[in-house]
Image (cartoon, rainbow, N blue to C red):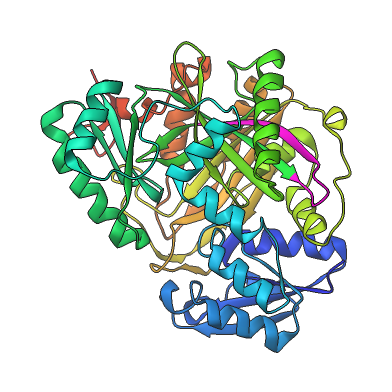
Amino acid sequence: MFKKILIANRGEVALRVIFACRELGIRTVAVYSEADEGSLHVRFADEDVCIGPARSSDSYLNVPAVISAAEITGADAIHPGYGFLSESAYLAEVCEACHIKFIGPDPQVIRLMGDKARARRVMKKAGVPILPGSDGPIESEDKALKLAREIGYPVIVKATAGGGGRGMRVVRAPGELSHAVKTAQREAEAAFGVGDVYIEKYVESPRHIEFQILGDHAGNVVHLGERECSIQRRHQKLVEESPSQPLGRKMRRKMGGIVVDAAKAVQYTNAGTFEFLMDADGRFYFMEANTRLQVEHPVTEMVTGIDIVKEQIRIAAGERLAQKQGDIQFSGHAIECRINAEDPDTFVPSPGLIQIFSVPGGPGVRLETFAHSDCVISPYYDSLIAKIIAHGRDRAEAIARMRRTLEMSVIEGIKTNIPMHLRILADPDFAAGRLSTSFMDRFVLRPGSGGFAEAV
């Protein structure tokens, strides 16, 4: 087992890794930017190293600074958390060259799955259902028009190295395609340094469902069930839950088996997530694979009782999976709400000083956060300040526990999206489980009221 792990991240995920390391008896090293000097992950790590100014490009995304911090402190492994360098094949390769263990998949797998066009081809070969589309990057406008005509409109243009909605454009008519491709290429180049895009069939109002897997270096792979991630805005998830209501035991077993076989086909190790779109007829289509820990991993932990971060560390240390597929049991229902420092109506970020921070616990409630009273929320990073996870015997109890937690939370000094979450939980379609990625499109700003109303 490792003696010391450096955490190449910040905020609540850095604390999450510290929790796991403390329970395993492993010392931790926090890295931080000048803006995060007073953060809790710095306080609770055994050692800490400042790696640069506030801008993430000069600190948390600075590979030489991260590696230097690991070498200076004698860390024998690096956990990247999620975001920042978590899916950086380059960091994984540098770690390998420096004899530091990267807690994640091998670099060649990260590189393969990070190229969405290549991943589509590999998944198709492995028997995973995929949407009709291009087998690689679009080479010319003429070929793009021909392909779109063959698969039928609407289509979606996607960056091969994309994520988070950047480099994506929905096209509903031939006259829109040229502009969409050029716009997506520019966005992709600016965001990811690679301007390649591909085309696939666009599914109207699908469900977004993902499967969590774990794989060890002996070739063993298990799935930990699915998460429903359909409640999202601009491709950014807001609410996640497990299990997904439309999936019965039979479909879960079938899709889980497909995902496990696909992971074995690419020799996947450590934790990962295979994401799918499910259409109105219950058909699944592969979308992408995330080669890292997911923000929403706690909902899976709540229904399975498995600590995914500990498993990541054990797998990276060379241990075999402790569980076989038949050992994994699912209990109850879990829901996660992402609490962001932002205006609940306009979604404009709301950085600043938190004067009061109080989120009640109670039965079945888990809180993951770096925030506290007198904490400053920086304008330099993502607006996520906390995750509230509620677990119940069934979905109704999980919703009830989430609602009373949100209603009794007191966060003053900044704005948060808690009022928006309460609107979502009160929505009849949400209560009935009628979900899709277009769910949030029904909520629009009501002129003059500052609040949301259902679109007519």
259 or 351: which is nearer to us? 259
Horizontal and vertical percent position of residue 272: 64, 46
Q: Is residue 97 left or right of residue 25?
A: left
Q: Is residue 415 above or below residue 229?
A: below
Residue at the spot 64% in from the left edge and 24% down from the top edge: 255
* x, y percent for residue 169: 26, 39
Q: Position of residue 90 (x, y in %)?
A: 54, 68
Q: Give the range drawn in magenta.
A: 215-229
Res 424 → quadrant: top left
Tell me, yes or no, if residue 373 can be seen here. no
In-front residue for pair 320/336? 320
Q: Mark yes or no: residue 113 visible.
A: yes
In this rendering, the answer to whether 19 lies above or below 335 is below
Magenta: main secondary structure equals strand
Q: Residue at x 72, y 85 (%)?
A: 73
The N terminus sits in image quarter: bottom right
Whether 317 is among the magenta residues is no
